[in-house]
Image (cartoon, rainbow, N blue to C red):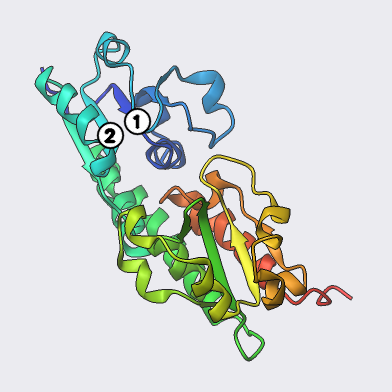
Amino acid sequence: MQQFPPRRIVCLTEETVETLYLLGEQDRIVGVSGYAVRPPRVRREKPRVSAFISADIPKILALAPDLVLAFSDLQADIASDLIRAGVAVHVFNQRDVAGILAMIRTLGALVDATGRADQLATAYEERLASKASAPRLSPKPKVYFEEWDDPLISGIGWVSELIEIAGGEDILPKLRFQQAAKDRIITPDAVRAAAPDVILASWCGKKVVPDKIRSRPGWSEIPAVRNNRIVEIKSPLILQPGPAALTDGLDAIVAALCPPDSSS
């Protein structure tokens, strides 16, 4: 029987897990993605049932969920298997800051926590506005965000927006509207021609190796490389479209854009 609000929720991505904890609704969660790390206690409290594009369907069904939360077309096959098995599935598809805020409010409605979700989203809106209005140096530092290294893939929508909120200028702003990673593939020459002042890198689950970036042909002349301003931002902080990106992810970008001698 379908329950409202749902009592047994499986979250196939990290951001819905974090949001439910922030709403105080974590007791409804019965299974999570293996990538869920926020808050840290989730790894002790909740069974892991999926990766990102794969899931243990029998394990999920054994948990008897009355709602499964998924993300984007990348989890469409998982969602369809669960739907065929009679499970209710809600698939989010947020790709920008407005979408993240809408996800928080929608998830709150799904678990009958509309007021708390609106308060949470409003607090993030106010924080973002405060960060955006903070005094910044001029001119804005030009920023290249690298989501993957082979091939080179630039940052998705919310990352580009957060760079601008932090006081930077995304060197590839038009690519923010491309949802699929394959549509954000760029050439090394395009980055070299744009001459970014700062390179931010988050290689989607693997450690960034700055020396690999420095050694690319012709990149030694890029200001960010020449001035040693290559900064890794950990994937869980920036590449998942949820609360972490709006808080720790944004703070990491702000810190990376500060002039190297700003602490002296």
Q: Is residue 167 visible?
A: no
Q: CA distance from mark 2 to mark 1?
A: 5 Å
Residue 210: image location, x then y, percent: 70, 55
In the image, taking residue 104 as reference, residue 85 lies left or right, namely left
In the image, taking residue 248 as reference, residue 73 lies left or right, namely left
Q: Is residue 224 visible?
A: yes
User: On the rendered image, what quadrant is the N terminus found in?
Assistant: top left
Residue 112, relative to residue 106: is it above or below?
above
- Judge the density around disc 2: few (<14), some (14-19), many (≥20) Cα neighbours within 10 Å: some
Q: Residue furthest front?
A: 217
> Label 2 belongs to which residue?
69
> Label 1 belongs to which residue?
11
Name the residue: 20% across, 22% down. 66
Which image quarter: residue 191?
A: bottom right
Residue 151, relative to residue 172: is it above or below?
above
| Three-letter code for the amino acid on which mark 1 is drawn | Cys
Residue 246, relative to residue 28: is it above or below?
below
Name the residue: 18% across, 22% down. 82
Which image quarter: residue 16?
A: top left
Report if the CB atoms under discs 2 and 1 are less than 8 Å apart: yes
